[in-house]
Amino acid sequence: MKPGILTSLRDNQPGWPRLLPGSLCVACFHAAVGIVMASPETNGPAALIPFEFSRGRIMLPVSVGNSPPMSFMLDTGYSMAMISPERAEALQLKRVGEVTIAGVAGNEKAAVFSGVSFDLAGATYSPRRVAVLPSESQSPSRRRDGILGHGLFKQFVVEIDHKAKQLRLHQPEHYEYSGPGEVIPLTFHTTTPVVEATIKAPDGSTVKGRFEIDTGCSGALCLGHDFVEENKLIGAEDATRNGVRQGIGGDVKTRMGHVPRLQVGTFQIDKPSANFFLEGSPVDAEFAKHINIQILREFKIIFDYSHRRMILEPYRS
């Protein structure tokens, strides 16, 4: 990514917004939850943070400066941190320009701020730039104060314990993994993590592909139209009803159903739910699909960007 130009900002729904060069692309709970300070041990986490699931998404208590905790979504699909316009105004953040966000059916400009420092249970994350949330992410059904994306995952090893509803942030230089989990190699599409995985099609054949990992998208799988058609992934008995996925500038029609099986590493997930896109794709044509939070919740998951790996540790039944 070129300095000062954010090339892959995405929302958590199809038509994920992208920042266009042109404008100043220098981009980039209310809930009463406790914040637990981490152990000072050398190999302990830098921070231990309880989180809540809201509409299938991970919501963290985050402070800006000395503010009370606010509700921020954790999203591997976002290239930069975002904040709601109401919070930006209340905090009197310093505006330094704007970015243009391209969506499924139109563009939208968003203000950009500097000098923002986020506090997560004593761990500090201070990105160069923070942008205002796109209007689609501010709808009443998705109300949130902000989003933390790639920068947080790059600064820390991020451990998500879905069963305990805890997030642990580790300093990469001190982190050593010794658990029973499986290491899955990561590559990156700009700033979004990508894994190799296999889908079993309704006719029994297997389809290998590169899947983006998106912690900010509800559901299990989102599969692009061309990928679905090419591999005949919709069986007569599989797609049960029509659906719509919302994005900036408009909506995208989908069919909701299942695929027989998804395999990531040696782990097999039977009949995961899927959104089959009837037009377009949730990602670029090179990928045409992504794995979402519903599948990831089956594991304790560790994102270690410094070593380009994701570790999946299944919960015991």
Image: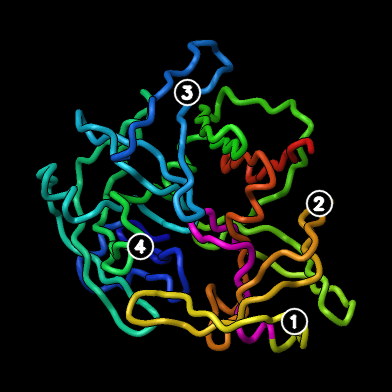
Please tell me which of labels 2 and 4 falls first in the chain: 4
Q: Nearer the viewer, residue 131 or 140?
A: 140
Please tell me which of labels 1 and 2 falls first in the chain: 1
Which amino acid type corresponds to the residue marked 3 in the rendered image?
Ala
Q: Give percent across and percent down for residue 60.
A: 40, 40
Which residue is tagged 1? 233
Which of discs 2 and 3 lies nearer the camera? The answer is 2
Residue, x 59% and y 42% (percent of image)? 303
Which amino acid type corresponds to the residue marked 1 in the rendered image?
Leu
Q: CA distance from mark 2 to mark 3?
A: 30 Å
Q: CA distance from mark 2 to mark 4?
A: 33 Å
Q: In the image, which disc is placed on residue 46?
A: 3
**Residue 168 is inside the magenta segment:** no
Which amino acid type corresponds to the residue marked 4 in the rendered image?
Ser
Which of discs 3 and 4 lies nearer the camera? The answer is 4
**Residue 215 is inside the magenta segment:** yes
Please tell me which of labels 3 and 1 falls first in the chain: 3
Q: Give percent across and percent down for residue 164.
A: 58, 32
Which residue is tagged 2? 267
Which residue is tagged 4? 141
Q: Nearer the viewer, residue 173 or 81?
A: 81
Q: Residues within 10 Å of mark 4 (few under 14, many from 20)?
A: few
Q: CA distance from mark 1 to mark 2?
A: 20 Å
Magenta-tinted stretch: 212-228
